[in-house]
Amino acid sequence: MDFKISPAEIEAHYAVLNKIGNLGSSLTDGFLRAGYSTAETAAMNYFANEAGKIGLNVRRDAVGNVFIECPGQTPEFIECGSHLDTVPLGGNFDGAAGIVAGFAAIKAMLPVAPQLQRGLRLRIWRCEESATFGVVYCGSKAAFGGLDADNLNRSFDGQTLADAMLSQGADPGFITSRQAAISQTEIDNIAAHIELHIEQGNLLEVTGKDIGIVSSIRGSQRSRVELHGQFDHSGATPMGPAFRRDVNLGMAHILVQLDELASRYLSQGKDLVQTVGIINCDSGFSSASKQINQNAITKVSGYGYFTLDIRSRDNDFRSSYCDEVDKLILDVAARFGLEVAMKVISSSPAVGSLDNNIQQQLTSSAAELGYSTSSMPSGAGHDAVIVAQQRRTDNSTVPVGMIFIPCRDGKSHCPEEFSSYEAIARGASVLAQTIFKLAQ
Amino acid sequence: MDFKISPAEIEAHYAVLNKIGNLGSSLTDGFLRAGYSTAETAAMNYFANEAGKIGLNVRRDAVGNVFIECPGQTPEFIECGSHLDTVPLGGNFDGAAGIVAGFAAIKAMLPVAPQLQRGLRLRIWRCEESATFGVVYCGSKAAFGGLDADNLNRSFDGQTLADAMLSQGADPGFITSRQAAISQTEIDNIAAHIELHIEQGNLLEVTGKDIGIVSSIRGSQRSRVELHGQFDHSGATPMGPAFRRDVNLGMAHILVQLDELASRYLSQGKDLVQTVGIINCDSGFSSASKQINQNAITKVSGYGYFTLDIRSRDNDFRSSYCDEVDKLILDVAARFGLEVAMKVISSSPAVGSLDNNIQQQLTSSAAELGYSTSSMPSGAGHDAVIVAQQRRTDNSTVPVGMIFIPCRDGKSHCPEEFSSYEAIARGASVLAQTIFKLAQ
């Protein structure tokens, strides 16, 4: 039995979703559906209403996540899930594509659901993006009792996370007491969990593949490195570290040597991406660090900072690599007479390997539907990371898989983020086909 | 005959000057005496009044510069000069030290002036600093008819240069018509011109010398380089130029290779200082280039910029070096898939060699007074550059020399700028001793 979901089905949901949290009148004006905002709730309610119309059950957990299920009395479930919140000035595909595809997949299987051994479920997680409250996977972490209480004091747009939760009918008390909003029985009965997501990179596009079968999810460590040197007259101070403590020059040497260090490990086959995303231009941090404004065209630079995002699917390697990075930065900075202040901003673990059986089922489903596939790591983190960390009573972990679909130019977290309805429909079809097989 | 000027004499002038344009109640609160401001005029008037009290003549040219002269009928003059304006949040020594020292030197020589063959003159130039109206050497350039008229439209603090000039009794009409405010006869009769200035570097301090004998003055080219790449997800986009057009990484490689290029020429004995003063943190330019705010910790960088200040005392070398720099930037940028926009912001020529006779006289004067000296290029530009460009009727140039005195930590253009009254007094003594010999 083949489940082919039409682009028209995808487009019908987007016709509504494109109007919720849009910052203008078109996709390219960008979106803001912050976690625990009225806009996020409106998008969740759209799917809850649609679910009700076709006879699906809708549950809400205490921390505001929405779960849509086929009716029936099966103990075990095959799930899919993702999120509907966006980063500020983001697109409508990161997260949303997974919800639209998941809803379409379950809707397509609804006629055969009564004959399946396992139930079908879509999880719409709240507040996945870290760009709003500064903490990633809020909703899914909170659902499983894994969100630290001090996050409730984080603010976005003048409101704490606790107040934002209350405003959307969610209960921050579960976070205060680190109490799970999903029962252990429910966790024990998750037979498989699959998240469909846009790739957020351009590997599928560059290699011309329809579907990515995600093999692992990279963990990350994000940090900020401040360098302190000395401001000096650019014309009167001779070159060289005997006379200059030049932050800009020292920083350039650090970044080139970090690039060489990463290249060395990449050539050894290690999984690694290393990115210096920001040099001196985080407006919030710069306004708190006034020294940045003392830099001038006719001065040797005395202060600057950069950010580092280091990701790998190999937690042990990442940990030792980050130690090497710290040492390299201190060594090179010392050669330029610079003082260093390093701060780890966030860290999240990798999922070294997604469930092998799910990967195989996804691959064969795609083949059955005539789609080309590529096995690939996920560079970005997703709610699926949190699901994959959950332990059942027998100490086994929940089997988790992920489907990637191509997105234009690999762009994400920007108004240009785009996946075609055709690409989403292909992913939704693979999702449905796989859920069907796993649920039999 | 030895002229030893006491630190107390220097201190007496600073007791007044420290209150004019001070942004608080102490030196370290910084100063603002903008060119063609009431504060600059007040500082000039202080010296004009002091000059009158001891019988010196005071002239003002049409563009607002003040000239103080010993009375007498000698056709030729030995001059000193500098400026009293400051950069915003600057110190009270860049420029001011030269005026205090020059006034003290002429005052010390006043008793013997009637017996000298040549007259003595102190030139207080207006508006030397480029940090206010964006053009350097305004007053001295205008005096010699060398300031372009379009500079009159430049603004500082909401006022055009033309309006600022009018407010201080100066006539912008001389600039409109590029007409000199100093006669050719007066230029023909400048036998020597000497500017005392703080070093604005730390060579004298590091080497423990009292006096710098300036051998040349570096010219400079200042430019801004913008790099355009592509914003991408930091976790999902593999490393390497096949997938990333990474501005921050490309920029780091450019800066390191520029450093290597400069080092190669320095090791060949070329005179060169190269400084990347600003990376991504010029608040005015950044607010006009909103792309800079799209950089984020979890994105590959798609836009950035840096400034370059390249100085040499060798105009031909600087010109060919700047060509090589442009080529290097384009080459490295291309390897990282980056587009480049380069803009030269300003350019000013070097004085390849200051007058040899004056250098010798300064050196021997210092030796006579028991001060240690070091021959050194001036990295920064000074009004002396403009005087050195002036041609007499016989096509010879005006002989120009410069004295450097140490300043603490080499700092300048900041509230920490500092030279001791002792250091200024030593410089003033060398100035007086040399002027005396040249005037005989």
Image (tube, coloured by chain):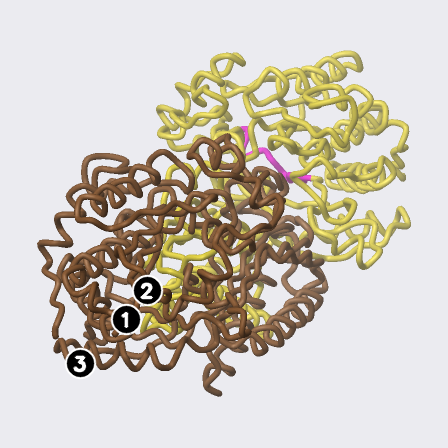
Chain colours: A yellow, B brown
* Of A281 and A163, the residue lying toward us: A281
- Report whether A400 appears left or right of B12: right
The reply to whether discs 1 and 2 touch (Cβ–Cβ < 8 Å) is yes
Residue B360 position within the rendered picture, expressed as x and y whole percent measured from the top left: 30, 82
Residue A220 visible in the snapshot = no
Labels 2 and 3 in the same subunit: yes
Distance from Cα at disc 2 to Cα at disc 3: 29 Å
Q: Residue B74 bears which disc, if any?
A: 2
Please report the bounds of the magenta region as a residue range: A186-195
Residue A188 among those drawn in magenta: yes
Distance from Cα at disc 1 to Cα at disc 2: 7 Å
Secondary element at image label 2: loop
| Residue name at image x 50 percent, y 28 percent | A143
Residue B341 falls in image quadrant: bottom right
Sequence-wise, which precedes: disc 2 or disc 3? 2
Farthest residue to the bottom: give it. Answer: B268
